[in-house]
Image (spheres, rainbow, N blue to C red):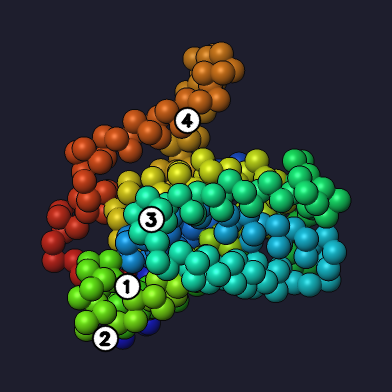
Amino acid sequence: MPALVRHLLWALLALALVVALSLVVDPFTNVRLASVGYYLLAVAGLTVLTGLTGQVSLGHGAFLFLGAYTVGLLVIHAPALPIWVDLLAAAAVSGVAGALTGAAAARLHGPYLAGATLALAVGLPAVTQRFPGLLGGSNGLGFTVSSLPPGLVGVVPTTRWQAWVVWATALLALVVLANLTAGPLGRQMRAVRDDEVSAALAGVRVGRTKVLAFLVSAVCGGLAGGLQAFLLGTAAPGSFTPALSLALLAAVVLGGTGSLWGALWGAVALVFLQAGAEELAHGFDLPTDVANFLPQAVYGVVLIVVVLVLPHGVHGVLRRISPQRKESTV
């Protein structure tokens, strides 16, 4: 079966499962389900950059910031545009930023690259303080996205429809991503990751491959940020702190570095570990200071355990359990 057809069938199956699950859960759980969808896309993009190409980025949250604010500004100032146009614009803006970042960072390695991308994650949200009239300052932008078709008003709850839109968009993007990484570009990325000198001797244009990896990763991040804005109806700098970039990188490691399937497990952990820790804090009536930091502490402990016990991540364990299963997205 051709790879494209196989990936499309997997995406349709996943979308059917999401739709079925959304029918039996409450609205709040549908929001969490949708959150897994856009985090999956963001982690998958970072997997391409870090897992496949070997470029460690600590600033991936900056691309989500660009995507969220692009959607927010378009919804506020051009409300007649359909949401899919807003999302395409978010992907385009973040893609341009990713290409520029990749071109600037193509010669950087290791901690130098990590430091440069971290500076991007720290500095970009501060732009909202420079242009408070346009970007809303520290409070950010608040808006309402009316995307529910007239025929479904009163029939399908808004949160359920949003979960469908988020997952349909994320799965479509993942089909494209899976085909890219399974083709010549993916092989070039893995060659650059394993040995840049050998890759260059084999005819791989190392600099261009790194820039393309940044471009692909940024497009995924911008689209994920746009989906987050679509879901939550807000774009605020407090949602895109460096802690988000670190959490996304941790999700890549937890799920399995270099695997798009691993991005799924990382996104699930990112949403539901935090949700479980928050419920645990409320259940034990912990002080506010402790409750605010408990989700990060729980996530950090789980990550340490996974790194020590399961160095190849959750998906690495699943591959060892079923060694005959062909990995089509690495």
Contact flag, marks 1 and 3 (Cβ < 8 Å): no
Amino acid residing under circle 4: Pro
The earlier-in-sequence mark between 2 and 4 is 2
x 83%, y 68%: residue: 78
x 54%, y 49%: residue: 119
Q: Secondary structure at mark 2?
A: loop
Label 4: how many Cα within 10 Å (few below 14, some 14–19, many 20+): many
Amino acid residing under circle 2: Gly
x 75%, y 72%: residue: 82
Which residue corresponds to mark 3? Answer: 56
| Front label number (4 vs 3) | 3
Q: CA distance from mark 2 to mark 4?
A: 46 Å
Residue nearer the viewer, 171 or 67: 67
x 33%, y 66%: residue: 53
Q: Is residue 65 found left or right of 314 in the rendered image?
A: right
| Front label number (1 vs 2) | 2
Which residue corresponds to mark 2? Answer: 203
| Front label number (2 vs 4) | 2
Q: Is residue 185 found left or right of 228 in the rendered image?
A: left
Amino acid residing under circle 3: Val
Q: Residue 189: which numbered mark, if any? A: 1
Which residue corresponds to mark 4? Answer: 295
Rendered location of residue 36, percent (x, y): 49, 51
Contact flag, marks 1 and 2 (Cβ < 8 Å): no
Q: CA distance from mark 4 to mark 3?
A: 24 Å
Rendered location of residue 135, percent (x, y): 78, 52
